[in-house]
Image (cartoon, rainbow, N blue to C red):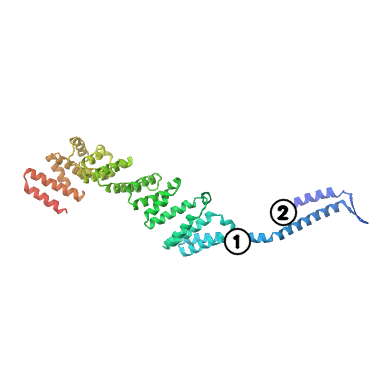
Amino acid sequence: MRSIIWFLLLGVVAVVAAITLGSNDGLVTIYWSKWRTELSLNLFVLLMLGVVALLFSAVHALRSLLTLPERASQWRALRRERAAHAAMREALAEHFSARYSRAHKAALKALALRDDVPQLRSDAEFAMLARMLAASSLHRLQDRPRRDALMQALWQAEVPRSNAHGVEDGARLLAAEWALEDLDADRAAELLDRLPAGVARRTQALRLKLQASRLQRRPLQALHTARLLAKHQGFTPTAARGLLRSLAAEAIDEVHDQQQLQRLWEQLDDSDRHDAAVAARAARRAVVLGGAQLARQWLQPFWEHLDALERDDREAVALALFEAAAGIEHDWLPRLESALETHGLESAVAAAVGMAYADRQLWGKARRLLEQSANAQALPTRVRRRSWRVLAQLARERGDELAAQECERAAAALD
């Protein structure tokens, strides 16, 4: 198709030339000294066009000759630039192929070639990426001193932030990850604190901050970070729930007095305070610290809506009340009766209600429930042991020393 178009154009030019030049009878006379030359106008026009074309070619050839050294220099620079980029690609390929020694050498080669190319000397991103590749390879080779030296050179390079295109932030994230692998949580936290606010909210930054907080044994900070990650869908819902509960439990277990525990409870998120497992853990810790009344205060909202809880959460709340039953108030009796009617077949609920009845000296009601919990294999050993000991106390209240001794032996057999 293209050939046909060219033939048509050539025919059009031929027709136009024949029409224009065929009837041109003009003459051009050139006088030079004693000589005179006459040419047809058509030949003169063709000669002038030829002369112009020849002059243009001569000027172009002369310019090419004069600019040859410069073009040769540009060609050599282009070759070095291509070699530098090829070395960078080689370093990437070797790094991802787990050949870290070769990757390190290729990255250093890219850096050396970059210094010989004027166009790359001003490319801060290229240099930072090459250093990061070399340092990452050294990290995999467990060569920490040389790795840190490369990263230090990267930090000390005075480069405008706009020229780095975020590579510096990536370098800090990578260095923080390496610090965590080296179990240097303080260094990782320092690097993460230097990140801009927008970068610090990224999922990877939050993951690293969570690991650093856990290594530093700051469960409350780790809990807040994990909640941000859960909001950004950094975990599956099931994994997020388990992690948040475990972090809340760590924070609760580290307190050493009631005031500290109450301050921690107030610092927890509403969703944590409304979590039955977290509330049960806090209540058990409060009992250990001598705050049974505070524990019951935290458990009360869950006992008022016991039907809305899952079975595992209901068991956790019941066992927490079992330990916090000492000095229980009389206004708890309607809640206990209601729980016994709806969930009396569950051993944990029966144990909690039985212990509360025993504390209120309702011996007849307490005895049946405590016997049920003492013989429940599904309950923890500590709960069954304590049930037997309370049953022994009840037997002594009745004056039945033989039954009390049998209960004591049953409790001792669980050790």
Q: Which is nearer the eye, 289 or 152?
A: 152
- In the rendered image, residue 303, in percent from the top left (x then y), is placed at 24, 38
* Quadrant assignment, res 138: bottom left
Q: Which is nearer the eye, 191 or 52?
A: 191
Q: Which residue is mark 1?
A: 79
What residue sits 39% from the left and 50% below the top?
A: 209
- In the rendered image, residue 36, in percent from the top left (x then y), is placed at 92, 55
- Answer above or below: position of 226 versus 51: above
Q: Secondary structure at mark 1?
A: helix
Mark 2 neighbour class, 10 Å CA radius: few under 14, some 14 to 19, many 20 or more: few
Q: Secondary structure at mark 2?
A: helix
Q: Three-letter amino acid code at disc 2?
A: Ser
The answer to whether any part of residue 252 appears in the image is yes
- In the rendered image, residue 394, in percent from the top left (x then y), is placed at 10, 44
Give me the disc on residue 100: none
What residue sits 12% from the left and 40% below the top?
A: 363
**Count of labels in the image:** 2
- Horizontal side of 361 relative to 21 (left or right) equals left
Contact check, label 2 and label 1, Cβ < 8 Å: no
Q: Three-letter amino acid code at disc 1?
A: Arg
- Answer above or below: position of 179 versus 347: below
Indicate the quadrant containing the C terminus: top left, top right, bottom left or bottom right. bottom left
Give me the disc on residue 3: 2
The tag earlier along the polypeptide, 2 or 1, is 2
CA separation in Å, label 2 and label 1: 38 Å
